[in-house]
Image (cartoon, rainbow, N blue to C red):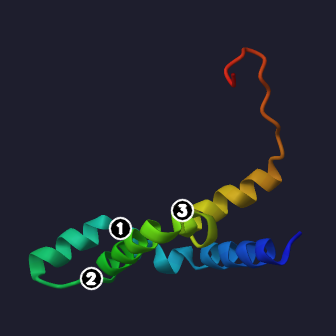
Amino acid sequence: MMKRQKIRKFLLLFSFLLFPVTLYYFSPVLIIQGSFSGIVTGSLILFAIQFVVSLFWGRAFCGWVCPGGSLQEYCSQVIDKKVSDKKGYLR
């Protein structure tokens, strides 16, 4: 495996392990509650950073840091099932 992929997999594992800690930062409800109180929340800052990063690097957050993407990455390694095209859906 290439060095870049090892770094990516490490970052994905790290973000997955921190997911219980960072769970509330991925909640848009916090942005609404904070806006009613006149407070800029960490969730708003996170979504703003994700938006700006996506303008320049596309889906870099999903492929390198997203806890949901890491769960998908590691589940695909555990369940190594190939897609079959028996009914012709993939054409």
Residue 69 quadrant: bottom right
**Residue plotted at (19% across, 78% down):** 34
Give neighbour class at mark 2: few <14, some 14-19, many 20+ (Cα, 10 Å): some
Amino acid under label 2? Thr
- The residue nearer to you, when weighing 2 against 23, is 2
Determine the secondary structure under disc 2: loop
Give the spatial CA distance, label 2 vs label 1.
Answer: 10 Å
Give the spatial CA distance, label 3 vs label 1.
Answer: 19 Å
> Where is 82 relative to 70, above or below?
above
Q: Name the residue under label 3.
A: 59
Q: Earlier in the sequence, mark 3 or mark 2?
A: 2
Quarter of the figure that contains the C terminus? top right
Give neighbour class at mark 1: few <14, some 14-19, many 20+ (Cα, 10 Å): some
> Where is 76 relative to 58, above or below?
above
- The residue nearer to you, when weighing 3 against 84, is 3
Label 3 vs label 2, nearer the camera: 3
In the displayed structure, does residue 84 sit left or right of residue 65? Answer: right
Give neighbour class at mark 3: few <14, some 14-19, many 20+ (Cα, 10 Å): few
Tags 3 and 1 in contact by the CB under 8 Å rule?
no
In the displayed structure, does residue 62 sit left or right of residue 39? Answer: right
- The residue nearer to you, when weighing 28 against 53, is 53
Q: Name the residue under label 1.
A: 27
**Residue plotted at (62% across, 71% down):** 64
Q: Position of residue 54 (x, y in %)?
A: 45, 67
Q: Residue 41 carries which label?
A: 2
Amino acid under label 1? Ser
Determine the secondary structure under disc 3: loop
Q: Which of marks 2 and 1 is nearer the N terminus?
A: 1
Amino acid under label 3? Arg
Give the spatial CA distance, label 3 vs label 2.
Answer: 23 Å
